[in-house]
Amino acid sequence: MVARQLRYSAGTWLELGHAQLLLDPGPGTLLRARRARPPLSPERLSAILLSHKHLDHAADVNVLVEAMTEGGRHQRGALLAPRDALEGEDPIVLRYLRDYLDRITLWEQDRDIAVGDITVRPVRHQHGVDTFGLVLTAPEGRIGFVVDGKLTADLAQRYNGCALLVLNTVLRDWNPDIEHLSFPEAMEIVQEVRPNLAVLTHFGMTMLRAGPRKLAQKATEQLGLPVIAAGDGLTLNDDAWRNPGAEATNVPAAM
Ligand SMILES: [Zn+2]
């Protein structure tokens, strides 16, 4: 999907409280940010959040550290990342860039991290490399990012209370050999958490072939809460998810 750029791989830009945060700067993030209308400015980011070091999530992390700090001229910003993105044999974050940042904080299960008026709680996932999903508590409400990884026993429970739940739904059908969520498993999590709005994203080929929008529509009917499939450039305003019963039809269309 990423190599062919069948879908954008630029991660998620969050404006919450007084902060702008960037989650998982995959390939093309800088380009997509600069080309967004209105443009998104890395110079204004408070933090870059890295769920794990796989390239489809982290390829642009160094470029974005450069852009956030204006080439190191302004030491600023935070990088929140798993330990193996910075240490060990194969770290992805270049050492010479690390001093450009105000701080680097490593994820640890259940250890809350404050970024401005946002609290970020990491949730460990099982995905081969060190991987953490996120529960963000902001003035606007609570948002969960169920990132890459397989469905484990207490995973859904850790996202309880999220008004908006974003799920990386790679597989159409369950596959025990791949440490990614399948559509039925993602729906299991949505059913347990019951957010005001669930957004499916990060589709693999089997999901794309099955038609993510069609599946999301089916899930909406079955679960009785709005489930949508993200498209490239999807923009969500908080009125789409802050109130229970928000209609999926109120969600702005993907660009
Ligand atoms: Zn991954």
Image (cartoon, grey):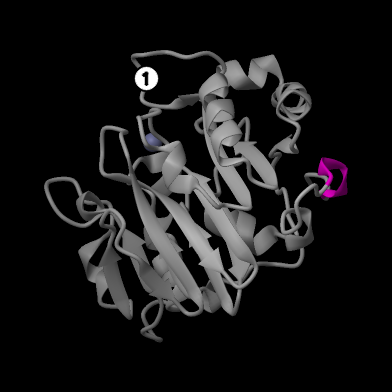
Report how many numbered discs are placed on residues in the image.
1
Q: Is residue 132 visible?
A: yes
- The stretch of residues the image draws in magenta is 247-251
Give the x, y percent position of residue 121: 39, 59
Give the x, y percent position of residue 223: 70, 28
Q: Is residue 27 visible?
A: no
User: Looking at the image, which is closer to me, 55 or 209?
Assistant: 209
Task: Specify the quarter for ligand 1.
Answer: top left
**Residue at 25%, 77% in the rendered image:** 99
- Image position of 51 (left or right of 34): left
- Is disc 1 surrounded by few (<14), some (14 to 19) or many (20+) residues within 10 Å? some
Dot 1 falls on a residue whose secondary structure is loop
- Image position of 155 (left or right of 45): left
Amino acid, disc 1:
Ile
Residue 250 drawn in magenta: yes
Give the x, y percent position of residue 163: 63, 53
**Residue at 42%, 27% in the rendered image:** 180
Q: Which residue position holds label 1?
A: 178
Query: Which residue sits furthest right?
Result: 249
Q: Quadrant of the N terminus?
A: top right
User: Looking at the image, which is closer to me, 33 or 221?
Assistant: 221
Please identify the dominant SS of the magenta region. Answer: helix
Q: In the rendered view, would you say 201 is above or below 171?
A: below
Rendered image quadrant of residue 55: top left
**Residue at 69%, 39% in the rendered image:** 230
Give the x, y percent position of residue 98: 26, 71
**Residue at 57%, 22% in the rendered image:** 183
Rendered image quadrant of residue 104: bottom left
- Image position of 230 (left or right of 184): right
